[in-house]
């Protein structure tokens, strides 16, 4: 099959077509190198240029100051559920976790293996259909850190602004909406993100960590689980995911060519509005997330019955739309429309949704 479908999968997810075309063109041999990126040693000058390009582009796109380190690690965001508390949760401290979905619940479970965790608030009674308001947050001023998940792929909710946390370090799992819009990096002490949703391919975890946190790291950690190891070795202590970092560098260049994150945010807002408008306009569809908590990246919605939802997925696949089945914990439908997802794909889905409603509504 050579014709590309519209890929609404939540991750691994759609990549920019220009990036795929460049990879295809240069996969056999990088220009001037004579070997594939898949064969290139991570100790070479060529790969050093690639990883430095990825870092510098990320610093430019996100406005990352010099007092933050940028790391490319393995183990995905899931390993960071453990690394964060192992490095930063002292035995005489507790950490505050704001639970807004499945992935933040998993982060809590791993942190509890290390130390004391306070679950500050959770809208689980509404099946995580909303992000909590500031006045619901009973934060501990002496906490080691506060952890949030910035976007919830399963439930289709997103933090629109950062919670006010005072002087307590704010840590975020930003796997599914990083690079979708500008963010105030200086409000965060540490950000981590799996690459496979909005940055690149699976197998790389981006970690952005502020220098002052390093003083908190205890001695005696396993070497690969100590952030200082990777900072001192510039993410090259062991063999990194060379291909994944190469893809990140290309995706960042693509974003820069589009005009940076402010321009990308405008595109993302317009794409999401197309989908939410049709959901709101037709009684046939019902959005899962509250209006003021809706995600730009993952649009979740239901139909009048599960039978219709199954039929929707079947007919959508025939029409060239893949990955629309919702997560089993929410059911329904989910359209993941990350940076690389084309506007014409959203327009095509909107047209399909209108026709489906006319046929079965």
Image (cartoon, grey):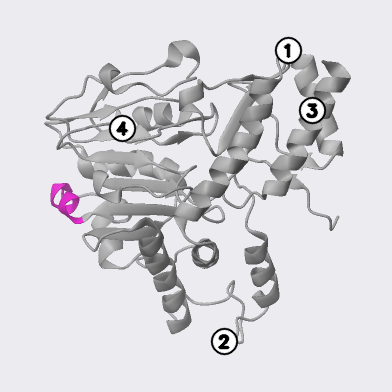
| Quadrant assignment for the C terminus | top right
Count of residue discs: 4
Which residue in the structure is indicated by mark 1? 304
Nearest the camera: 152 or 230?
Answer: 152
Q: Judge the density around disc 1: few (<14), some (14-19), many (≥20) Cα neighbours within 10 Å.
A: few
Q: Earlier in the sequence, mark 3 or mark 1?
A: 1
Q: In screen coordinates, is 54 left or right of 309? A: left
Verify whether residue 213 appears in magenta.
Answer: yes
Residue visible at 74% across and 46% down? 6
Rendered position, 260 above or below 197: below
Crowd tier of the residue under label 4, counting other residues whose Cα lies within 10 Å: few below 14, some 14–19, many 20 or above = many
Report if the CB atoms under discs 3 and 1 are less than 8 Å apart: no
Q: Nearer the viewer, residue 246 or 117?
A: 246
Residue ID for mark 3: 354
Residue 310 on the magenta segment: no
Element under label 1? loop
Is most of the magenta stretch helix, strand or loop? helix
Which of label 3 and label 2 is nearer to you?
3
Of badges 4 and 2, the one in the foreground is 2
75 to the left or right of 40: left
| Inter-mark Cα distance, 4 to 3 | 45 Å
At mark 2, the secondary structure is: loop
Instruction: Report the residue marked by disc 4.
Output: 111
Residue lying at 67% horizontally and 47% vertically, measured from the top left: 343
Quadrant in which residue 105 is drawn: top left
Say which residue label 2 marks: 33
Of circles 2 and 1, the one toward us is 1
Q: Residue 2 vs residue 61: left or right?
A: right
Which image quarter holds the N terminus?
bottom right
Is residue 311 something that shows in the picture? no
């Amino acid at each position: 099959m050579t014709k590309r479908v519209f890929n609404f999968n939540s991750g691994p997810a759609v990549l920019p077509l220009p990036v795929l075309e460049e990879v295809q063109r240069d996969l056999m041999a990088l220009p001037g190198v004579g070997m594939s990126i898949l064969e290139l040693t991570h100790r070479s000058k060529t790969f050093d240029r690639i990883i430095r390009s990825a870092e510098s582009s990320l610093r430019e796109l996100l406005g990352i100051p010099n007092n933050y380190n940028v790391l490319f690690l393995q183990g995905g965001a899931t390993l960071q559920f453990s690394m964060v508390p192992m490095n930063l949760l002292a035995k005489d401290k507790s950490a505050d976790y704001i639970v807004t979905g499945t992935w933040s619940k998993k982060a809590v479970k791993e942190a509890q293996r290390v130390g004391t965790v306070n679950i500050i608030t959770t809208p689980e009674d509404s099946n995580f259909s909303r992000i909590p308001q500031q006045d619901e947050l009973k934060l501990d001023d002496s906490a080691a850190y506060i952890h949030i998940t910035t976007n919830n792929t399963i439930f289709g909710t997103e933090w629109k602004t950062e919670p006010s946390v005072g002087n307590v370090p704010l840590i975020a799992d930003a796997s599914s909406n990083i690079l979708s819009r500008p963010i105030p990096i200086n409000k965060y002490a540490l950000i981590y993100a799996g690459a496979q949703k909005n940055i690149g391919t699976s197998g790389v975890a981006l970690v952005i960590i502020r220098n002052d946190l390093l003083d908190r790291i205890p001695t005696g950690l396993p070497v690969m689980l100590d952030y200082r190891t990777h900072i001192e070795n510039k993410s090259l202590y062991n063999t990194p995911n060379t291909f994944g970092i190469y893809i990140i560098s290309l995706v960042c260049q693509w974003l820069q060519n589009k005009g940076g994150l402010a321009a990308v945010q405008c595109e993302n807002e317009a794409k999401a509005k197309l989908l939410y408008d049709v959901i709101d306009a037709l009684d046939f569809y019902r959005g899962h997330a509250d209006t003021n908590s809706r995600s730009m990246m993952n649009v979740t919605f239901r139909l009048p019955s599960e039978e219709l939802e199954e039929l929707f997925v079947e007919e959508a696949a025939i029409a060239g739309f893949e990955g629309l089945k919702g997560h089993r914990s929410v059911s329904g439908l989910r359209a993941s429309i990350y940076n690389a997802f084309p506007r014409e794909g959203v327009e095509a889905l909107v047209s399909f949704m209108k026709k489906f409603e006319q046929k079965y509504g």
